[in-house]
Amino acid sequence: MMTPDVWEKSNAHYLSTALKWVQLRLERVVGESAVTTEEIVKIEEALRETERSDSPPAMVTLCHRLGLSRFEQDVLLLCVATELDTRIPGLCARAQDDSHKPFPTFALAFTLFDDPTWEALSPHRPLRFWKLIEISQISQPLVSSPLRPDERIVSYVKGLNYLDERVSHFLMPMAFSRDSTGLAPSQIRTVHDVLHRLRSEEGPFPLVQLVGSDLLSKQLVAARVAALLGRQLYQISVETLPVPISDLDLLSRLWEREGLLMPIGLCLNAQEIEISGGEQAKGLAQFLARTGGLIFVSAREALPITARPSLIAEACKPTAEEQQSAWIEMLGPNSADQASQLASQFNLNLPSIWRTASAVSSDDGKQVTSKVWEACRATERPGLGNLAQRLSPKATFNDIVLPENDKKLLKQIVGQVRHRSTVYRDWGFAQKMNRGFGISVLFAGDSGTGKTMAAEVIANDLDLDLYRIDLSAVVNKYIGETEKNLRRLFDAAEDSGAILFFDEADALFGKRSEVRDSHDRYANIEVNYLLQRMESYKGLAILATNMKSALDSSFLRRIRFVVTFPFPRYEDRSRIWQTIFPMREAGQGTSSMPLDLLDYDHLARFNLSGGQIHNIALNAAFLAAQGKTSVTMPLLLEAVRTEFLKLERPVNDMDFKWKSHNGIRPAMRSTATNILELQKS
């Protein structure tokens, strides 16, 4: 086997000899010099000898891989010669007895070379099918039209093997190494399985469909398989495929040609494609029907592609155990408990784990645990930002006022999220279950009774992101788009461990209706998809509704917890009033805002929800700020009156009259004192 330097010299010598052979052929036709047949035969024998070597020249390799006949090879060589030798165009013009034809034609080739064949002109033969030559046929016969070699082919014959720019601007290289970096043991098993099945196939490579929800895992597996086959992998998104069929056909032919000339493979990203119809699905099917070589298709589910044989393999993220091992490797042997929590709550690739842990552990080693947790939370935020609103939880269990049984339910929810790895994985429940690993919760109650606040309390206690679903961003009038949005939403939430909060859930999880037209049918399809996705979701999803009866009964069957938020009783309203005003930092015992002595018994008599009490307290604070005074009972009563008028409720003037009797009444202690006693209780 030649070294690259030796091969380059040999290829250059072969090419110069071949150009000399073309020149002699032309000169013999022109008759301007005494070119003998023996001289031409001698050069031909030298060329044939070089072609039979173990490391043949580029021209010979190209003709062998693309299936050119001897005459077609001679035609291509004639075209290449016009680009590499300035004497050839003039000889072509004299050979055709026309000074306006300083270019090769099929007619000239028929005259110039031995054993010409008419089929070389066919669009199905290699010269035209693989776009090796360009024919400028403008108002003239095909045989007399100018021929010009493709620029990429000229460079290849010269020994420069690079990707055609008409193909390269569609592609991005996947620069993954040959070793197992970024692959977990389960993923390496998938690599070996795909590799074995590819090598056991006879003939062309079958299409490899890698299915799963994580794009990076599939790319890593595809890159590893390609590397073991000695190929560089490139990727292209289905969305970037050209729509006009002529452009798509050109791209597919050029790519397949590149695959024959270079050790490359292609990974098609069809992650978001709807194979049931649409331009993207049609474009993908047409591209695959026209293209051979090593091709991977990355999709969520196996696509019904019939254009070529397929092998299907699942490429998922590392298992929870593999993620835990990776965390321990990065954070140290004493981090087993933390690693277990991280692997239980977040679902990350090994590269993501290594990148996150490396970035945080390099930060002077301070508060690594909390910083790793926060970095994991932020991993999938971009995927959720367009479909949901991230809330910043501030409320704690000390802030929320609920009946004791309902508060216990909230703590049970927190406990199940926190210890699910112990129950499912360590205690073996996962071996007995196929679905239902997530926790779905229904918060039912009137507006303002604390449903959103309860979601914040849970997220705050678990130190997880809370996302309120924006129904206007999720629900789409176009068929299939709502399901696509929900799928992206659930996938991103699972990976980042975020809590999904569906406010006014009855708008999205409503009862299925009787099918009267296509709109009803597709609306029911959306509900059916939600039923399936909720059951397979592995995180915490909270549904809040003011109308429990409006929810589909199938959703209620899948709900693990139902927390009812009653309208606050008198005692509850008193506690809400005593905790509604902000405090300074815990332990200082004084309010951060000027408060007068308040009569909580009197305020609790107003039949108000927690949300309404919050509005009143806020309005009273603004009144106090405007009047440069403290928050007093008269200001609060004025704010209560405003709230009543807003709600169009009757106003009894006697309820809004308040007067202190003999100074401080027992219920008129400071807000700080009441809060401290409530926290102790």
Image (tube, rainbow, N blue to C red):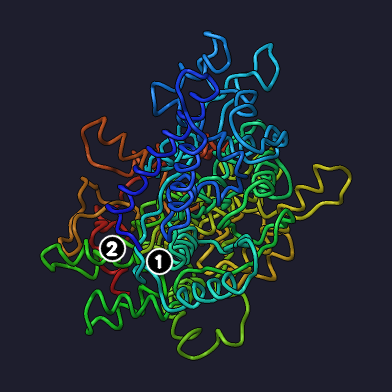
Marks 1 and 2, how far apart at CA? 10 Å
Q: Quadrant of the C terminus?
A: bottom left
Q: Is residue 354 above or below residue 599?
A: below
Could you say whether the residue bearing mark 1 is in a helix, strand or loop? Answer: loop
Q: Residue at x 70, y 62 (%)?
A: 309
Coordinates of residue 128 in the picture (x, y in percent): 63, 34
Q: Quadrant of the N terminus?
A: bottom left
Disc 1 target residue: 348
Which of the pair 306/601 is nearer the observer? 306
Q: Residue at x 51, y 56 (%)?
A: 501
Disc 2 target residue: 356
Q: Residue at x 62, y 75 (%)?
A: 435
Q: Is residue 446 above or below residue 140?
A: below
Residue situated furthest left in the rendering: 364
Are dots 1 and 2 in contact, CB under 8 Å?
yes
Which of the pair 371/643 is nearer the observer? 371
Q: Residues within 10 Å of mark 2 (few under 14, many from 20)?
A: many
Residue 474 placement, left or right of 305: left
Identify the amino acid type marked 1.
Leu
Q: Is residue 448 above or below residue 124?
A: below
Q: Quadrant of residue 231?
A: bottom left
Coordinates of residue 73 in the picture (x, y in percent): 56, 40
Which of the pair 320/405 is nearer the observer? 320
Q: Is residue 41 above or below residue 546?
A: above
Residue 195 placement, left or right of 346: right
Coordinates of residue 339 in the picture (x, y in percent): 32, 78
Could you say whether the residue bearing mark 2 is in a helix, strand or loop? Answer: helix
Identify the amino acid type marked 2.
Thr
